[in-house]
Amino acid sequence: MIKVAITDDHPLLLEGLKNILGSSDTIDVVDCFKSVSEMNEGLAKHNVDILLLDINLADINSIELIKPLKKKYENLQIIMLSVHNELPVINSTLAEGALGYIQKNASVSEILEGINTVYTGNRFLCSQTTSVLEKKTADGLHQVPKLTRREKEILAEAAKGLTTNQMAEKLFISPHTVESHRKNLIEKFQTANLSSAIKLAIEYGLIIE
């Protein structure tokens, strides 16, 4: 039996996946988690083969969890469950060590195929994701930018409409430092201005609206 755990903060989707996978003769859903803290506690208790991981949990962008989880549980394989089908997001999850990427609206047969494929140590991408990779261009971002804690703070505050001086006062840094971070963010996102960088950050789940 393939021992599977699911992490998703949407109860209906979590229950639906549990029921779908529970009908398989080869899959044992050992636990379901609604948060990162529940997941960390549960994974320590169970010998899990495959983790189905929601890419956008309420408290964190799950891309940041992949590498630490793989380091802690060497035999764990991760399949990302996503509503995102943008090339940078897909590339980043695969680069961090996820072996599967499945859209949340994928068919039941694709989900089951993905689990069985990843269990054998092979990469699995659902048909929608495969189409995106086949159409990729050389222009634009190829991966989601890796941001520092301070850069994330600047993005979040800028998304609320705060000015440079307001951000400096709130974060206890100088306006010059804020401007430096703004410039770095624009460069990392390869945009013409911070507003466009904010839009991409929201799209990629780096900022929760």
Image: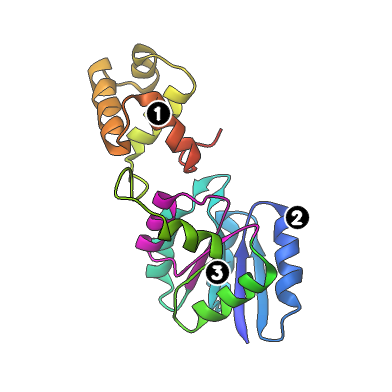
> On the rendered structure, is 156 left or right of 18?
left
In front: mark 1 or mark 3? 1
- Look at mark 1 in the image and give the residue it sits on: 196
Q: Which residues are magenta?
A: 77-105
User: At numbered mark 3, what does the secondary structure look like: helix, strand or loop?
Assistant: strand
> On the rendered structure, is 122 left or right of 139?
right
- The C terminus lies in quadrant: top right
Q: Amino acid at mark 3?
A: Leu
Q: Is residue 71 above or below residue 90?
A: below
**Which residue is at the front of the view, 151 or 136?**
136
User: What numbered label is drawn on residue 12?
Assistant: 2
User: What numbered label is drawn on residue 51?
Assistant: 3
Q: Is residue 74 above or below residue 156?
A: below
**Which badge, 1 or 3, comes first in the chain's sequence?**
3
Q: Position of residue 12 (x, y in %)?
A: 75, 55
Q: Amino acid at mark 1?
A: Ser
- The N terminus lies in quadrant: bottom right
**How many angstroms separate mark 1 from mark 2 (CA)?**
33 Å
**Which residue is at the front of the view, 136 or 74?**
136
**How many angstroms separate mark 3 from mark 2 (CA)?**
18 Å
**Which badge, 3 or 2, comes first in the chain's sequence?**
2
Q: Position of residue 155 (x, y in %)?
A: 40, 30
Q: Is residue 43 magenta?
A: no
**How many angstroms separate mark 1 from mark 3 (CA)?**
33 Å
Circle 1 packing at 10 Å, graded few (<14), some (14-19), many (20+), is: some
Q: Is residue 59 above or below residue 41?
A: above
**Which residue is at the front of the view, 140 or 144?**
140
* Residue 183 visible from this viewpoint: yes
Q: Is residue 157 above or below residue 201?
A: above
Q: Position of residue 81 (x, y in %)?
A: 57, 59
